[in-house]
């Protein structure tokens, strides 16, 4: 009888805590609705408008805005976005796994302090970081000034290499964190069991470690791929306008008040993003590896 009363009290406490958590989450859902859901609904509507700017005067229902998807510049931009995002994601998987695995194997007591140092640059504005890289990538920068070797800097602004470096530098932490989280959840007994079965360290890595870290790899890949695919600041600043991604066309469309065509491209990207989120939910249902 006493056990039943204790269980009932625990159940009531759990329900009370869940109710409190629900109340605390209301501001987040309001924020999400106003600044995410509502703009998406507006874009869904104006993509079928034929009007200048956002105006109900002379508004006509049309599908001509979708012709932007068949324009040569848009197709090239989609191809560039896919190329840069895929290459950046592959490179981030390689280096991100190396960093996460070495940190996982290390005997450092406070590993999360190392992760904090890795994530710390992400707390600063991304435009400041990109402009800092841009100044460093020029022929004359602070390094060349200090050592008195003006004119012998990297001088790679406006090249593909500069864009790749900028994307990798910016988004690599998004790969390290989920992979490290997956590695930390591996039972240490599995390492001993694998070695007891006679496998080598190399086989253990490929047969045990990598498969068990696959959730982190998939989550990290999505978190790197999506911002690379939709971003416009890095190619605009580091590419010096020589390379156009789909994010640049969307930004130009909204800047030039071509909201209708910009909305079409934004919705296409949004569909891709939602599909990617569904993939992450399938692979990592508990959300254990997400930042």
Image: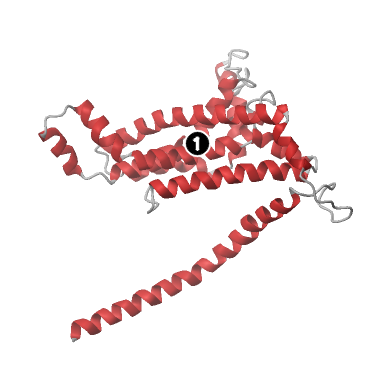
Q: Residue at x 61, y 61 (%)?
A: 33
Left or right of 93, for residue 155: right
Above or below, comparing residue 151 to residue 259 in the picture: above
Q: How crowded is mark 1: few (under 14 residues within 10 Å), some or many (20 or more)?
A: many
- The image quadrant that residue 235 belongs to is top right
In this orientation, which residue lies closer to the viewer: 84 or 118?
84
Residue 3, how many percent across, how many down? Answer: 19, 81
Please, which residue is most extreme toward the right here?
58
- The image quadrant that residue 190 belongs to is top left
Residue bearing the label numbered 1: 171
Left or right of 207, for residue 126: right
Left or right of 46, for residue 289: left
Q: Residue at x 73, y 53 (%)?
A: 45
- The image quadrant that residue 134 belongs to is top right
Q: Residue at x 65, y 34 (%)?
A: 246
Residue 247, how many percent across, how many down? Answer: 65, 36
Residue 56, how many percent across, how many down? Answer: 84, 56
Residue 278 seen in the figure: yes
Left or right of 176, for residue 190: left
- The quadrant of the rendering that contains the N terminus is bottom left
């Amino acid at each position: 009888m006493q056990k039943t009363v204790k269980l009932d009290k625990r159940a009531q406490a759990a329900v009370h805590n869940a109710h409190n958590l629900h109340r605390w989450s209301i501001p987040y859902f309001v924020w999400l609705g106003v600044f995410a859901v509502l703009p998406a609904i507006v874009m869904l509507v104006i993509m079928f408008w034929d009007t200048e700017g956002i105006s109900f005067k002379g508004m006509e229902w049309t599908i001509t805005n979708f012709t932007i998807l068949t324009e040569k510049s848009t197709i090239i931009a989609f191809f560039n976005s896919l190329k840069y995002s895929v290459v950046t994601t592959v490179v981030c998987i390689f280096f991100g796994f190396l960093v996460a695995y070495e940190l996982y194997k290390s005997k450092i007591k406070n590993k999360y302090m190392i992760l904090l140092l890795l994530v710390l640059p992400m707390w600063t504005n991304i435009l400041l970081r990109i402009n800092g890289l841009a100044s460093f990538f020029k022929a004359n920068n602070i390094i060349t000034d200090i050592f008195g070797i003006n004119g012998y800097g990297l001088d790679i602004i406006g090249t593909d290499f500069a864009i790749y470096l900028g994307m990798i530098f910016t988004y690599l932490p998004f790969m390290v964190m989920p992979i490290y989280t997956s590695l930390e959840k591996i039972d240490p007994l599995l390492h001993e069991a694998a070695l007891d079965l006679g496998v080598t360290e190399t086989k253990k890595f490929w047969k045990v470690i990598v498969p068990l870290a696959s959730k982190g790899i998939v989550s990290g890949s999505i978190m790197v791929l999506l911002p690379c695919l939709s971003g416009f600041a890095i190619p605009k600043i580091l590419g010096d306008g020589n390379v156009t991604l789909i994010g640049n066309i969307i930004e130009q469309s909204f800047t030039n008040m071509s909201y209708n065509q910009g909305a079409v491209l934004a919705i296409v990207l949004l569909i891709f993003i939602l599909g990617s989120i569904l993939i992450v939910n399938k692979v990592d249902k508990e959300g254990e590896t997400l930042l």
